[in-house]
Amino acid sequence: MADSTTEQTLAGGKKPQLDLSAAHWQSSSQGTGDVQIAFVEGYIAMRDGRSPEGPALIFTPAEWRAFVLGARDGEFDLT
């Protein structure tokens, strides 16, 4: 079984280790793929729902907002 904590590094320092074992993961009903997110201790965790035992990316609220706004603007479109 994979470790249920994760730690990510950012430019200004390290984010705290989060226990994701009891996280309530949510999936989108739109789009392709199976990205899941969970709100944990003031952070946003994101993982691949097809490989839930794999690593999760951890975002601060500001980082998450920038990611969502970029996605809405088509910044990550591959076509």
Image (tube, helix red, strand yellow):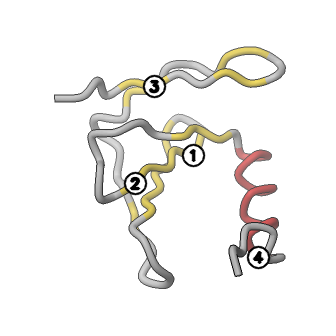
Q: How many marks?
A: 4
Q: Assign the C terminus to one quadrant of the image.
A: bottom right
- Where's residue 40, x and y in %? 49, 40
Q: Secondary structure at mark 1?
A: strand
Q: CA distance from mark 3 to mark 2?
A: 14 Å
Within 10 Å of disc 1 (Cα), the crowding (few <14, some 14-19, many 20+) is: some
> Mark on residue 52?
none
Q: Nearer the viewer, mark 1 or mark 4?
A: 4
Q: Which residue is mark 2?
A: 48
- Where's residue 4, x and y in %? 31, 28
> Mark on residue 44?
1
Residue in view at x 39 percent, y 67 percent: 34
Q: Nearer the viewer, mark 1 or mark 2?
A: 2
Q: Which residue is mark 3?
A: 6
* Residue type at tag 1: Ile
- Most extreme residue toward the left is 1
Q: Are marks 1 and 2 in contact (CB under 8 Å)?
A: no
Q: Are marks 1 and 4 in contact (CB under 8 Å)?
A: no
Q: Secondary structure at mark 3?
A: strand
* Residue type at tag 2: Asp
Q: CA distance from mark 4 to mark 3?
A: 27 Å
* Residue type at tag 4: Arg
* Residue type at tag 3: Thr
> Mark on residue 72?
4
Q: CA distance from mark 1 to mark 4?
A: 18 Å
Q: From what the image shows, is residue 31 above or below residue 50?
A: below
Residue 45 appears left or right of 59:
left
Q: Secondary structure at mark 4?
A: helix
Within 10 Å of disc 2 (Cα), the crowding (few <14, some 14-19, many 20+) is: some
Q: CA distance from mark 1 to mark 3?
A: 12 Å
Q: CA distance from mark 2 to mark 4?
A: 20 Å
